[in-house]
């Protein structure tokens, strides 16, 4: 657990020196400890050795691209990974979530929007709800243990990213009842849904795959037409 008053460590992996300096200065002024790395291959080693609270990854990097960096460290690194994508590039957005990024943001970077996302993700680790922290949830053969952040299906552990776990736990809290896309978005991102962002749909798709759901006829996480999504209590 990250201590609430601790200065959070951020590794910014960006080869555009002026952009990196601008973002780093903005975050440092708000008491974040930011270090900059300009190469993707070097970033892999630094993520593993320094274990920052947050990694902000550009996609286009010398040495190793950001998608490959995320893929290389995701199984061992349990902090938050942001990927910076090209504006409107849906392929980058989809692939970012598929390789385990917790969030993405389109360039050009808007520092205040980035800060809001960072604060929202870090808040989940610094201000847990005591009533929920140790409340194990089950839905059919699915078991979710928030104290250990472990998910099991019939006793077999399923590896999820931080964002995937948070989304699944949110659905499990209301298992058997549909939750609107708007409500999910506000709980996950800490802001109102703009009607365009597909990150929730992409995470649902990835969750279904990891939970063994048939994408053509999902039975564990069901789509509720005109509403949103529902975690079934029957499987």
Image (cartoon, rainbow, N blue to C red):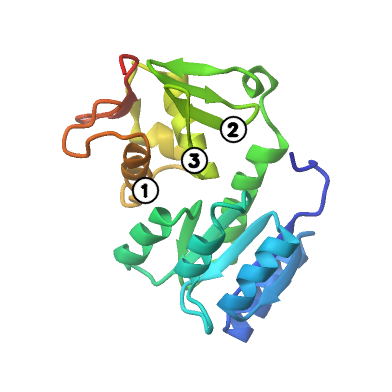
Residue 94 occupies quadrant:
bottom left
Residue at the spot 32% in from the left edge and 41% down from the top edge:
209
Q: CA distance from mark 1 to mark 3?
A: 30 Å
Residue at the farthest left position: 216
Q: Is residue 104 left or right of residue 145?
A: left
Q: Is residue 103 visible?
A: yes
Answer with mark 1 or mark 2, whichever residue precedes in sequence.
2
Disc 3 residue crowd, few under 14, some 14–19, many 20+, Cα 10 Å: some
Which residue position is annotated with label 3? 159
> Which one is in front in this view, the residue at disc 1 or the one at disc 3?
3
Does label 3 or label 2 sit earlier along the sequence?
A: 2
Q: Secondary structure at mark 1?
A: loop
Where residue 30 appears, x then y in whole percent? 76, 60
Q: At x 31% / y 18%, what residue is drawn?
A: 235
Question: What is the C-alpha distance between the residues marked 3 and 2?
Answer: 10 Å
The answer to whether residue 186 is above or below residue 98 is: above
Q: Nearer the viewer, mark 1 or mark 2?
A: 2
Residue 132 in the image, given as x and y percentages of width and height: 62, 21
Left or right: 135, with 4 as reference point: left
As drawn, 31 above or below 131: below
Residue 118 appears left or right of 163:
right
Say which mark, if any, is on residue 149.
Answer: 2
Residue beneath disc 1: 194
């Amino acid at each position: 657990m990250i201590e609430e008053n601790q200065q959070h460590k951020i590794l910014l992996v960006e080869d555009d020196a002026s952009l990196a300096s601008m973002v780093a200065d903005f975050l440092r002024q708000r008491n974040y400890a930011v270090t900059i790395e300009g190469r993707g291959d070097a970033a892999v080693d630094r993520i593993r050795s320094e274990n920052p609270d947050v990694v902000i990854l550009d996609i286009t990097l010398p040495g190793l691209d950001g998608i490959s960096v995320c893929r290389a460290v995701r199984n061992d690194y349990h902090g938050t990974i942001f990927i910076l994508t090209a504006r409107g590039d849906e392929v980058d957005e989809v692939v970012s979530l598929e390789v385990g990024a917790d969030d993405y943001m389109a360039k050009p970077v808007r520092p205040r929007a980035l800060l809001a996302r960072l604060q929202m993700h870090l808040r989940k680790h610094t201000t847990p709800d005591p009533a929920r922290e140790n409340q194990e949830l089950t839905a059919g053969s699915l078991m979710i243990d928030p104290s250990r952040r472990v998910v099991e299906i019939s006793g077999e552990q399923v590896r999820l990213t931080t964002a995937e776990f948070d989304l699944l736990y949110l659905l499990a809290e209301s298992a058997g009842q549909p939750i609107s896309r708007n409500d999910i978005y506000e709980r996950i991102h800490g802001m109102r849904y703009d009607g365009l962002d597909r990150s929730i749909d992409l995470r649902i798709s990835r969750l279904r795959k990891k939970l063994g759901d048939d994408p053509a006829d999902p039975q564990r996480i069901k789509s509720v037409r005109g509403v949103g999504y529902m975690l079934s209590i029957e499987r």
